[in-house]
Image (cartoon, coloured by chain):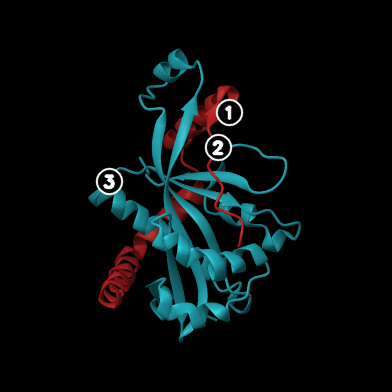
Chain colours: A cyan, B red
Amino acid sequence: MIDTIKELKSEILSDCYLNSITNFECYEKELESFLKEDALENQKQGISKTYLFFYENNLVGYVTLLTDTLRLEGELREFFKSKDILYKTLPAIKIGRLAVDDKFQRQGIGKNILEYALILTKMISQEYVGCRFLIVDAKRNQDHSKDSVHFYKRFGFRTLKERSKGTLPMYLDIYLK
Amino acid sequence: MAKPIRATPVLRGEDAKRFVREWLEEIEHPSKERVAFIKSAEKNKDLYLKMLNDANDRYYKRT
């Protein structure tokens, strides 16, 4: 059992971690193949950035982040004005992918990675460029314990827009009043 | 090749209204889950920032 984030180390994905990535296994094969096949290329193209998390030299999880916007459209000028919403494009950071290796599930690593993404987003917002939300496409799974919609709801994420199948877009306001 | 990262949907009409109502409600009355999560992250903020800074230092030395 990993008790604390003090035992985790993060690294930015680069060629030297290709061996570590080879051993990464996740029940969501899509999350595994993204890391093995696409994450580095996306990063080289400036599309996203992937952070790897290690525990005792084992790759235990990763998160891929990119910039995003939350866009509101339609003939709603009066409605938005009445609610003091002045911008219809709201800045966000998107969690493109987040996964924990199967061997390290249920040890709080997913929560640690999510907190890391939150702190990184708040740091960007407070020191560099405005950003108000974390956005994620949560993967559904019929097994409740593997359903990431349930995982994100536990941390206060809300549904952005209902979708009948596939992933569910969710958001979190990173600021407390 | 895995599936590309999906675009975040544009919110129109009732979806946009619902989002704004829920967001404003959340600002005024934040959920206990969101408060707990943000406070938990803030409690360890220095550790996370050190992890991030160290990772950045090593990355820029490598590249």
Kindly identify which chain the residue marked by label 3 belongs to. A
Marks 2 and 1 close (CB-CB < 8 Å)? yes
Residue A83 location (% of width, % of height): 42, 21
Query: Are tags 2 and 1 found on a single chain?
Result: yes
Residue under numbered circle 2? B9
Q: Residues within 10 Å of mark 1 (few under 14, many from 20)?
A: some
Taking the view exactly as shown, the residue that stands out farthest to the right is A142
Whether residue A117 appears in this view of the structure is yes
Residue under numbered circle 1? B15
Real-space CA distance between mark 1 and mark 3, rounded to the nearest whole angstrom: 27 Å
- Amino acid residing under circle 2: Pro
Q: Residues within 10 Å of mark 2 (few under 14, many from 20)?
A: few
Residue at 40% x, 63% y is A44
- Horizontally, residue A104 falls left or right of residue A95, namely right
Residue under numbered circle 3? A129
Residue at 68% x, 62% y is A146
- Horizontally, residue A36 falls left or right of residue A130, namely right
The quarter of the image holding the N terminus of chain B is bottom right
Secondary structure of the residue carrying numbered label 1: helix
- Horizontally, residue A77 falls left or right of residue B44, namely right
